[in-house]
Amino acid sequence: MTAPALPILPTTVVGSYAIPAWLWAAWEKIEAGGFGAMDLAETENDAVDTAIRDQERAGVDLISDGEMRRQGFIVSIFKYFRGLRQLEPRRKVGVLAYDGHVFYEPQERISAPEGLGALKELEYLRRATTRPFKITLPGPMTLATQITKGGPYRDRLEVAADLATIINRELRALAAGGARNLQLDDVYQSFLMEPKRLIELYDRCFDGVAVERRFWHICFGTLEGFGYGERTYRPLFPAICGVSADQLVLEFANREMAETRLWREFDCPKELGAGVLDLKNFYVESPDLVARRIRRLLESVRAEKLWINPDCGLARLPRHLAFAKLQALVAGAHEVRNGLVGAPSTSNRPPSVQGDHELR
Ligand SMILES: [Zn+2]
């Protein structure tokens, strides 16, 4: 079946979706070795179905599989790498922060002989939905922040260069398998590296990858809701406007829409996937607030270049809240769409937003 045409101001997600209560419970049993391969596959498929159905019910135009097969944003990707030795976290007590992470030390050149698992995600998504969808992968520098120097690598940039080759192979395979929308996710730690190095790494990952749309989500990090760095994209401009990505997916809502003018100031030719849901905040935005945020963006970005999404992945929210926020996002986008002269009407119908945000 052909996917429906996208409306103006298309709505989408960044990647992950809220984890259902039963999946949290299943993970405990999975980690204790209580699931066989068939049990695991069935559970993961059910979780993906849940994420897809919620996004469809909310009326999101371009969806994801909720990254339900990954436990944590990048944690499960490491199981595909060879040549790394797992290190003990430097701190195990108290609040979780970056020093509580598992780190890895290279023993030899890093490889991923069986790929990174995204082809399985593509195969299932193609069967499970008729909506257009995106597939995401963490960027090389983001993965490299959990790998120390060592073995053949003198620093993290050398590690990231090899990871870019591995990611490139995965993206090429996804494109060959029929994926149309591919995204890399990077945590922007402005003090860690020059923007041009980050951009070069993105371009290496997408070298020779022919798809309809290449997305790049750059966020400020969200470990337990905390970021890692100054919340500004300004140091990335104007260099970022020359990256091979078609669309930059950025956070705005949790910064009260600061820096929306960067697009006009630098006459940036890229599409903007703008975050209009604050995910470091438990309140549910009203459709009117979402619409006001979109109108603010339209002062600097042309409507045909603007996409609407949450600030980041939804995995850190309880499901009822994630769903209610997505409903508000879609309703707000419709409100603005309806006010645009000559807006195409081929969009998913907005759901009626509930007075409270319990799942019905
Ligand atoms: Zn993010």
Image: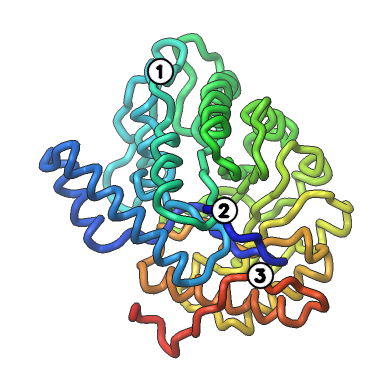
Q: Circle 3 is placed at which residue position?
A: 346
Q: CA distance from mark 3 to mark 2?
A: 14 Å
* Horizontal side, residue 20 vs residue 77: left or right: left
Locate the C terminus by quadrant: bottom left
Q: Can residue 141 be seen in the rendering of this structure?
A: no
Say the numbered circle drawn on residue 5. Answer: none
Q: Circle 2 is placed at which residue position?
A: 2
* Horizontal side, residue 241 vs residue 1: left or right: right
Q: Amino acid at mark 3?
A: Thr
Residue 329: x %, y % from top left: 57, 73
Q: Amino acid at mark 1?
A: Pro
Secondary structure under tag 1 reads loop
Sooner in the amino-acid sequence: mark 3 or mark 2: 2
Q: How is the image coloured?
A: rainbow
Q: Amino acid at mark 2?
A: Thr
Q: CA distance from mark 1 to mark 2?
A: 33 Å
Picture residue at 64% right of the left edge, 30% below the top:
209
In terms of image quadrants, where is residue 82? top left
Sooner in the amino-acid sequence: mark 3 or mark 1: 1
Q: Kindly indicate whether the residue at mark 2 contacts the one at mark 1 (C-beta within 8 angstroms).
A: no
In terms of image quadrants, where is residue 140? top right
Q: CA distance from mark 3 to mark 1?
A: 43 Å
Residue 71: x %, y % from top left: 34, 45
Picture residue at 78% right of the left edge, 49% below the top:
270
